Amino acid sequence: PNEVKRFQLLATKWWNEQGDFAALHSMNDLRVPFIRDNLLNAHGGRQPGKPLAGLRILDVGCGGGLLTEPLGRLGADVLGIDPVADSIGTAEVHAWHDPDLRGNVRYRAITLEELSEKGGKGAGQFDAVVASEVVEHLADLETFTLCCNQVLKPGGSLFITTINKTQLSYALAIVAAEEVLRIVPSGTHDWDKFVSPVELERLLESNGFHVESIRGMLYNPLSGAWSWTESTSINYALHAVKLEEEPNPDEDDTEDPTVIVAQAKARRWYN
């Protein structure tokens, strides 16, 4: 609830490229090609000028649609979801002005858990799930991971960008970025919610994914640009693929998304 309230206050500011979300705008220079190229490796080019045509992508925590729109322009059928209704409203208004997006981009004010639980309607629908700068705001990573698995098709891709949990990330992502340079609003991040690549990989691979690649990302506050780096000590991008599983006739109910989420909550309670 606190995270939702925080982003509620910022809902009208998503498309100010020099404002609170400037770093996310410039991050598209890395994350859009990262998503595009990995999907092309898996699926091949579909259509000249629209390389992701025919693919369904779920953008989780889409905010104002900063990443949803460029993926739609590449031809993908993209559903952006976010629990902050005002952010969804901002996204819909912005996309409406671009006729090229009207057939490719849709938005819903809903959580990933709600989407995966709605009578199984979200199950196995998507070729890719994108969660960019989202997991560091979540209270429950395991349920998030299970829900991503549930909505993906077998062999589907999960793309995550987030912040490592290191002393350096605390110094730069919180102290410098929030308190000194004011790149993002104060209080945006909670270091306790940051997750290391090792921990995230372990969580994903214990919940039906294989991690294909992890790449370090570096933000230059002087130029406002992002670049790839060998170090994952601050920001990183991850690509994982949902494993193809053999159906188990003795466990028919485990495919029910409500059961999957309930099982995750039960494990956390007993632990």
Image (cartoon, helix red, strand yellow):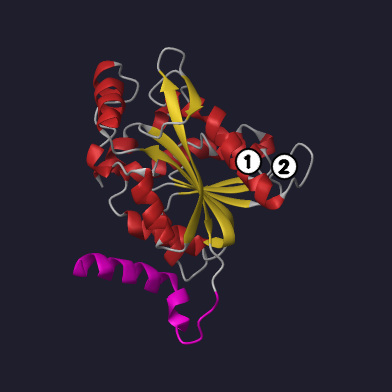
| Residue 42 picture location, percent across and down | 66, 51
Q: Is residue 199 magenta?
A: no
Q: Residue at x 39, y 43 (%)?
A: 134
Q: Check contact, mark 2 vs mark 1: CB within 8 A.
A: yes
Residue furthest out toward the left: 270
Residue 183 horizontal side relative to residue 69, left or right: left
Residue furthest out toward the front: 230
Q: Name the kind of residue labelled 1 in the image.
A: Arg
| Residue 181 picture location, percent across and down | 30, 16
Q: Is residue 65 above or below residue 242?
A: above
Q: Name the kind of residue labelled 2 in the image.
A: Pro
Q: Residue at x 59, y 47 (%)?
A: 78
Q: Secondary structure at mark 2?
A: loop
Q: For mark 2, what is the residue?
A: 51
Residue 160 horizontal side relative to residue 202, left or right: right
Q: For mark 1, what is the residue?
A: 36
